[in-house]
Amino acid sequence: MELGAALAMLRTLLVAVLLSLPAAVSAGPQTVVLVVGADSHVRDLDPIAIRKLFLGLPVFVQGALLHPLRNRSDPQLDPIFFQQIVAMSQEAYDRQILIGVNRQGWLRPQEVTDRKRLLELLYSDPDAVSFVWLRDVAHDARIRVIRVLWDE
Amino acid sequence: MRVSRLVMILSLLASPLAQAERLQGEFLLFSSAEAAGTFDRTAPVTSIQDEVLKADMLFSLQRGPLKLFGEYLVTDHEADLERFQLGWQMSENTLVWLGRFHQPGSVWNHEHHHGQYLQTSITRPAIEEWEDLGGVLPQHFSGVLVESSRPLLSTWRLRTALGTGVAPVITPRGLEPYDLVHPNPPHGELGFQARAALYSSEFSESGAGLLLAYNDLNAVGWPANATPNIDRVDMTLYGLFGTYVDVNWKIAASVYYAQANLHTATPGVDHSFVVGYVQVERRLRHELTAFARLEDSSGAAESRYLKLIPTFARARYVTGLRWDFAHYQALTLQATDNLALNGHFKDIRIQWSSALL
């Protein structure tokens, strides 16, 4: 196994352990995680699938089309979104969205500017996928972290 | 207003979309305004319109794997339902469409469609032109289109498209595709198109591919004493294309070989013709992009088919400069030296284009 993959697995394991501890544990460092609702059938998504999803391309898991939710509740998440999730500049991303809509009617990921609203959507939609600060969901039993996307 | 049965059938099939708890939608508007002037002109007629205002409206509705997608173009000269497609996302890799679509055998139109803002140059290559603007290849079909993208050799992607549908007819005014909103029987026979292209990754625009198309074009509306007295045209098309894209450069090249046979009362020899183009774009500072395009052909002047559309440009030299500014807006200046079948002229154009999402 490559070192990078091993470190990523260790980081995910550490997050899982932290989340399983009682509520008295404080939120970890600045960490952005990929999340789904606790009832979701999504267990993991590789970086390519995550990138496709947030570019508006169709991504299926167990026969269901996933619904990406772009978290715009915190401006600090925007550069992390462009660098870590879609791996392109904002200008290139905007152009890809235009091209996708024009060619095949792709849909832009739904943008949610309110954190509570985002969590409500994740609770209610088993196909919804989004990204949040770990500290915002560390003790939320209705949210499941499936991957660490970035940490400081 | 008569509306074709196909529009009604597609709308009924799309009704499950209306029952959705989670119906998602998207709307995109491409706007443009263009002015053109010609000079040094020996051609008696050109296909150029002096001023054009355009609003190209796209909508997409989706529930689960079902999608309804449409494109309605309004200009100061026309209004057309350009695309109207009911789609089924069979899997991540495969999308099946039923409806009116742009034929996948056109390299340029498969990438840009009518999205003026998305293409760097103001005009498209002559071989890729739309039917109602003097185009010589069928571009709009009503039928079935299957698009697929599959992994190949680890990171590479093979993108394919197969289409079949009602082909345009050829009239004294040029090619006329089947109109969903104003259906006008009698109309065309079936046409078939296929495209396969290899790209270096899922997200890469650099790649190369092959095209194949066969179209049977009925002749409609020709006077009995017309010369030639055409019954129909059958056309076979082969194409090769390649695109290279990086941060500062884009190079796109295509070549088509066409054999168009006229079925007429007057015997004649039908010559094949070859048309190709290469466009180079260089991104400069201050949001400027310089571009140049060379179009050329072989056998075009001898083709009985191309002589039916004498405004076709058998060679062109295009240069221009585009400035992107504000949010999704661009100003473009372009100069062209045209050698059409019916003569020569130069033109200069200026265009404002934008996208609103």
Image (spheres, coloured by chain):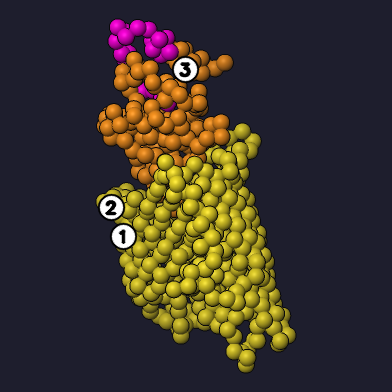
Side (left or right) of B263 relative to B321: right
The residue that mark 3 highlights is: A8
Q: Position of residue B111 (x, y in %)?
A: 49, 54
What is the chain letter for disc 2?
Answer: B
Q: In which image quadrant can residue B47 be found?
A: bottom left
Residue type indicated by callout 1: Leu
Q: Residue at coordinates 54% horizontally, 76% vertically from top-left?
A: B184
Position of the N terminus of chain A, as image quadrant, is top right
Chain in orange, by letter, is A
Q: Marks 2 and 1: CB-CB under 8 Å?
A: yes
Q: Colour of chain B?
A: yellow
The residue that mark 1 highlights is: B331
The magenta-colored residue range is A15-36
Whether residue B18 is situated above or below residue B121 in the rendered picture:
above
Badge 3, how many Cα within 10 Å: few under 14, some, many 20+?
some
Residue type indicated by callout 3: Ala
Q: Position of residue B238 (x, y in %)?
A: 65, 61
Residue B40 appears in the figure: yes
Q: Position of residue A48 (x, y in %)?
A: 50, 32
